[in-house]
Structure formats: structure tokens, C-alpha cells
Amino acid sequence: MDAKDQETVLDTFPKLLQSHVERRPNRDAMREKDLGIWQSWTWAEAAREIRSLACGLASLGLERGDKLAIIGDNRPRLYWSMTAAQALGAVPVPLYQDSVADEMAYVLDNADVKIAMVEDQEQVDKMLEVLERCPKVEHIVYDDTRGLESYRQEFLHQFEAVQQAGEAFDRDHPGFYDSEVAAGNGAEDSIMLYTSGTTGNPKGVVLSNDNVIITARNGIERENLTAEEEVLAYLPMAWVGDNLFSYAQSYVAGFCVSCPEDPTTVPNDLREIGPTYFFAPPRIYENMLTQVMIRMEDAAAIKQRLFHYFMDLAGKVGVRILNGEPVSLKNRLLYKLGDLLIYGPLKDVLGLGRTRLAYTAGEAIGPEIFDFYRSLGINIKQLYGQTECMVFICVQPDGEVYADTVGTPAIDVEIKIADSGEIMYRSPGVFQAYYKNPESTASTKTADGWVHTGDAGFFDEHSGHLKIIDRAKDVGKLNDGTLLAPKYIENKLKFFSYIREAVVFGDGRDYSTAFINIDLDAVGNWAERRNLAYSGYIDLAGLDEVYQLVKECIDKVNLDLSQDGKLGNSQIRRFLVLHKELDADDGELTRTRKVRRSTVGERYGDLVDALYSGQKECHVETRVTFENGSIGTLSADVQIREAEYYPPGGIAREAAA
Amino acid sequence: MNEQHGGEVILSVENIGLSFGVMKVLDDISFDIRRGEIRSIIGPNGAGKSSLLNVINGFYHPQQGTITFKGETRRHMAPHVAAKDGIARTFQNIALFKGMSTLDNIMTGRNLKMKTNIFWQALHLGPARAEELENRLEAEKIIDFLDIQAIRKKPVGKLPYGLQKRVELGRALAAEPELLLLDEPMAGMNSEEKEDMSRFILDVNAEFGTTIALIEHDMGVVMDLSDRVLVLDYGKQLADGLPEEVRNNQEVIDAYLGVPHEEEVA
């Protein structure tokens, strides 16, 4: 069949599913580890599950254009629910499974959800809690029955019961499913994804089948992905990336997707599946590296020396080998030996032994972290994307990977830089609209299809790659007119494994300052090796030695900044180590762990004032929400310290070492 | 939870007296446990709570009184009889095999359920193989139930305390007990771990119908979980009744709670 021809026919997910049933009925479509054993479903089996589920949902009243909410961890049944809804022309709306009831209520109501497909008792309980506020929700279907035996509500249905009803419905209405699938087309709404929103309420991004499928196909074409790929679906289903990598691209390319046993077993499952195509946000790569380093610190001396010798070698030549640059024969041979002794086993432990392509996106990744993986021979690349265009805006091409850029435009994507410095793009993936929010749609998408990203950036003169500095609206100015890019500085700080989060202030002030969150694992281990006693996070964060450690990190960033032209004067002058970890439950981070700068600034107003008042110490009391939902108070005396200042443009001296 | 269990009496102890030399540890204790309930035993340190559990599962032999379990009255229990008859327990100080994995520890809890002899088991053939698979499946169900998949193959000695407690509960559950004795399952836990453990105790009770006898210090937990509460003080029985009754009993307040109990805020 001609490729172009296929595109015109296979324009919805149920149609793609049918094509796989015809072409590769007995190949695995999905896998899940249950009771310690990997269970798998072929395309033909998956199609049967989806058909009976779709008919079951139809018997519950789900119709073309209705919305089906999907809430839970990555489970085959929840992915099937997406296709089942799409088969009826209904629109799946995945929600973040860890969102609290209030957040859930808003989305359920805003999205006009008719039926909710949820994973287990935890989610059912949350649904029941908010149901009064969501009168449009008619039914709730749940997968895992544990703990739900005593629930008697009529609108609660067990997954298998819905499928059985679907089978009966299918018998009574032969041809119903097929005609519903045939009625679907590329222009129809495919999915609605809520953006986490650093400000205000989340917005529902409506994407059509064409948006999703054409973008998925372009991504596959650019990276030569095939039906042989192995993927582990472990990121939240509500996130656009999971929908692209674990759902859309699987349906287009025909590869198998595996679901982890449990969110906590992901490292084991990674090792067992050995994905060839892998996506992770920078923090996961960071965590993996931190774990490796912590374990190496405890390893025997000979192992440590081997590790450090070969990692040094990899640092020198690994990236060059991966980029296909010339490397001496001796180093090539040594690298091969290193692969046998260190790199290979290490990659296997990480579960990246077979990885052909690894992406990272969402936040900037630390250059040493990036280079660590690349030097091992893992082809990790950065991409730049948004929910509003089904991910792809820019991707780093093979062999042209730099830590500080996000690469060249993806297939069919046009990019321009507005006069304000804001990046804008146009592509076949550009979303239809924000659901029921024409004002936001109009302010984001121009009449001729250009989308405002809200990010400031420029094309690098040497490489021609796009470079992003900050959110356009976050770029501020100090009182002396120096440009301040807080996120740019925060990212530099977060590249140190000891620093987990940083929040930089300074817009409209005389100088810039920072809140620091230390990384409990890394700093805890560091403290243990120095025999420093601490009882918990607060205690550790207040230690003088830890302050000194953080100061050293900040000094290095300041030195770096002093060389950074226009940003030279925005060095951190004063800082403090926050007494509490910033947490999404307190609204300080988004669910995707991005800092809400204004919320943090307001919550800790006293601390910000103290940073600008010359105080050495500040007493704070903070309300915190514990994981069980109860509220308590933390109080602490937070110290404030000054960091080294380097004259802008000055030559980097020995202090750099 | 806290609904009246009108179930038959599964265990009753009558006029139990236990002394070590001149030390009277238990003095004329009588109480019963009904099938399907969560029965708590509280009291200050040294009140005799753990000793009472040890009497129930036959580890200590009382000098006076009788124990009736599932209709059979005895002067004292023997540990192997207790285990065979469906009594399992966890310990105040964790008693797991530290060098063995979580899975293996839970499998040891299935020991009594295995019928084939050591010869077949060593060969891992025929009936022993089928039995091993069946028992592994049961162990996996417990791992899934307790949400400890991530530590399935980790040596338990390296696990944090809260998780070790959970593994110990898993091993006790593996014996499919009718009566589960839990000796301070939440000692030394933070509030989040306590909440998880409380959830598991309720789930065990609701899902498997297991009768539970619980020793616990955290009054909030006891009042929330228990159907009935027995209060001991220096080996004597101070009170026995519904949580509200015990909470309002003046003697109990004086001896144990000190002040009228106020809801603790975590």
C-alpha cells in the first residue's frame, strides 16, 4: 500500500488498530507485569478488549462528542479506554492520577465529562467526594476491585461488567461498532489534554486526530522508528508526551508498549524490558545518575578506580565516538574495553542497554548529566515541545547534539522569533482550541495558525539550533537595567546534584537573590560521609556545612554569569536554604514539578523581604499539607548568607577550579 | 469498621494467671475475641500485653486458667498447634530472616501449607514443583496486596523499618491465619506509615475476614480501628468494652491516658 494512500485512510486510532489486527495480529501490542509475571496482549486480543469495552460504554450512553475522563496509573485497560472512546467518536480526557479532589473537580466539570474510567478505590473515593460538584458525570467505571466490594452505588460499574454488557450490546446491534469506527475522520477531536498551567486554572487543549497522528508519524519518520521498538509507559497518562510516545506512536508504528507493575518498580521494569526508545524528563536522568554515584561511593576501591578511569576516558572520547568524529585507534580500543567492563554493565543496570534513542524535555538538562549518558554511548537528545502542538517543535538531529540548545525544527514545523524575543511556531500538530475558552485560544493562536510559546529564545549563530533562555514573561530587569532570566540561573543552580530546586528573585530590585532546596539524598549522603549528624530535612538544611556547600555552588554559577555578557550583573548576592521542600500539594510546584514563582514569593514573603533587608536570620512559620491531607505548621529560623560577587566581564581566575 | 460483629467467639481465655517467680505478669485475665473483629489490647509499658499474646500462641504457659480456641479448651497452647490451627503473629521487635529477600520471607510463611516432603522439594520435580508454583502465586498476591512489589527481591535487612514491618505482616498473612496477632505493628512509625499500616489492617480484616488482635500504643489508631478494647495495667484487667466506653472509663483515664483523651492532630 502506498504511504500517502494509507494516511488518507488510517486517520483515526480505531482504524489504525484495525490495520494492525490485519497486518500483525499475533504480535504483542501491550504488556503489563502482574503478580510478578509479564502478561501480554496481541493486537488481535487488544482489539477484542477494545471492541467490547466500546460497546459497553455505548450501552452506558457514551456518544459521539461526549467526554470520557481517564484517571489512574499506566494500565493497559486505561489505554484501551482511550481507543474505545475514540471508536465511538467520544473524546478521552486523561487526568493526573495524583491530583487532589479539588483539582479533579475543576477539570471534570470544565471538560463536561460524562463517564469517568478510573483505576482503583483511591480514585473512586476521590470521584465520590467531588461528584456533587460535577453533575454532568453520569457513570464511573473502575478497573481494580480491591476494597470496592461494599460500594453499592448504581452508577459504579466494574470494568469487566461493562465489557460483558458490551458483548451483549454488540450481539444486539451487529455492525454498530464498525459503522461508528467508519464514521470517524481526521478532522474530529481526538483527545483533550489539560495543561498543568503555571498560573490560573488548567486549560483543556483540544487536539484533532490529524494533529496527533500526523505529528506522531513525522516523529517516527525523523527518527526511523519501527514496529520493533520497545517502550515502557511510566509517565502520567495525562501528560502529552506519554500520549505521544506510549499511545499515538505505538498505534502508528505498531510497536509494543509495556506498563510497569507499580510506580515504585519502574527501575526494575526498565531493566527487564530494556526499552529501545525512551523518554524521561531531566530529573529522572538526574536521579539515575545520583543513584549510580551514591552506589559508587560505597563500592570497593578497585571498582571505584576502574569506574573513574573509564568514565574519564568516556568523558574525553565517548561523545565524539557517538557523534561520529575522529578518535585515535588506541582510545577506540580502550573505549571498547571500557564498554565491556563498565559502560555495558552500567547501561544494563540503568535499563538503557538497548536504548537506541532517548529523549529528554520539559526543563533544561545539566550539561554534565547530559554528557554522562552520551559518553556511555546512549543517544540521548533534547527536544522542545508543547501540549499545544502534540509535543514536537524542535529536536536535536543525530550527531548535532549540544547541551545548551534544543535542536532544529521538527518535520513540517515553521518557527519564527517575534520582535519581543518570543518563539512562535506553526505546524500540522497545532491544536484546535482551548476547550470553552475562546479568549485564551485567541491570545495564544493567531488567525493564520501561529502559536505563541511564551518562551524567549534565539537561533544560535554557529549551529543554527534554537536556544531557549527563559519564559518570555519571566525575563525581568534589575533596577540598574540588567536583564534577569531567573529560570536560566535556576537551571544553572539545579545542575548541581546537591541542589534540587532553586527560586531566583530580583525583578524590580537592586540585586538578585535565591531560595535553595537541597537534594535530601545527595546532601544527606554527603553529610553522612562527613559524619555530620542531622535528624531530618529541616535540620540538614540549617547546617553551617551545608550552607558552605551551597555557597560554593552559587559562587560557581556567579562566576559563570559574570562571563555572560548582558546577564553579567544578575549574580546571586544573597541566598537562603529553605527549611521545607517545595511541594505540589502546597501549590508551590505544578504537578509536573515546575516552580510557581509567584506563589512561592507570596507564601514566603517574609523571607524575600529578609533577603533584601540585610537581616542575618529570619523566623518563619509555614502551613504545610501532609500527604494524608492534614494540615500542620512548620517553624524554623532560616539563616541568610551572602555569595561571592565577580566583576562582570572579568577574566575567569583560579577561583574557577 | 466498628460495626458490631455478632460473630461466634473464636478465642476465649479464662482466669489466666502467669507469673515468673514472684513477678505476677498476668493476674486473672478473662476475655474473648469474636470471629471477624479487630480486638485491641492496650496498657502502659509492662502491663502484660505481649505476655498475653505469648500465652495465646503458646509461647508462655500460664499457671492458671484455660484457653479455648475454636471450641477446644486447653490448659495452655503450644506454638506449633497454634500455627497449625490458624494463629499467626508479628513481633514487637521484627523477627524476619534479614539476609533473605522479601519474597523468600513471605514464602516461609507458607511453610505449613506445603505438603510435599523435603526429598521432592530438593529435586524441584513433580508435585513439589506444582506446589511451589501455587505457593508462589499466593505469595505474589500478598506482595500485590501490601504494595511491596518494588522490594520483592531485596534482602529485608536493608529495608527501612516501616517496610520491614509490612513484610512481617505479609509473612503472617501467608499462613492464611484465622486469628492474626499483631504486636505493636506501628511502633516507631511516622504518621504516614501509620496511616498506611492502619489501612492494611482494615483491608486484611475486610477482605480476608481475618480476626485481628492488636497491641498498639497510639490511642488515635486504637480508637479508630478497634471494635472492642481490653485495657491492662500491671497484669490486671482494668476495663473491657467498646472504644467509647473505654475512652470514658475513669480508671482507664487515670491509669493510662492521664488526661481526658483529646484528638491528636497529626
Image (cartoon, coloured by chain):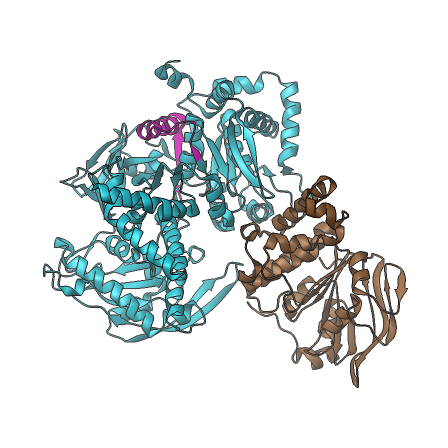
Q: Residue furthest left?
A: A650
Q: Would residue A619 appear left or right of B35 to someone viewing this image?
A: left
Q: In which quarter of the image is residue A374?
A: top left
Q: How many marks?
A: 0
Q: Chain coloured cyan: which letter?
A: A
Q: In which quarter of the image is residue B77?
A: bottom right
Percent position of residue A60, x then y = 61, 30
In percent of the image, x 10 and y 59: which residue is there? A649
Chain B painted colour: brown
Instruction: Using the rendered image of the protein, determine whether residue A203 is visible from the camera's viewpoint.
Output: yes
The front one of A425 and A440 is A425
Instruction: Using the rendered image of the protein, determine whether residue A112 is visible from the camera's viewpoint.
Output: no
The front one of A12 and A323 is A323
In percent of the image, x 29 and y 47: which residue is there? A370
Q: Would residue A472 appear left or right of B212 to someone viewing this image?
A: left
Span shown in magenta = A201-230
In percent of the image, x 65 and y 70: which residue is there? B219
Percent position of residue B171, x then y = 67, 56
Query: For the C terminus of chain A, which image quadrant?
Result: bottom left
Seen in the picture, residue B15 relative to B181 is either above or below; the reply is below
Percent position of residue A533, x then y = 42, 74
Percent position of residue B210, x then y = 74, 55
Query: For the N terminus of chain A, which image quadrant?
Result: top left
Whether the magenta-drawn stretch holds residue A168 is answered as: no
Q: In which quarter of the image is residue B266?
A: bottom right
Q: Would residue A554 appear left or right of B214 to someone viewing this image?
A: left
Whether the magenta-drawn stretch holds residue A227 is answered as: yes
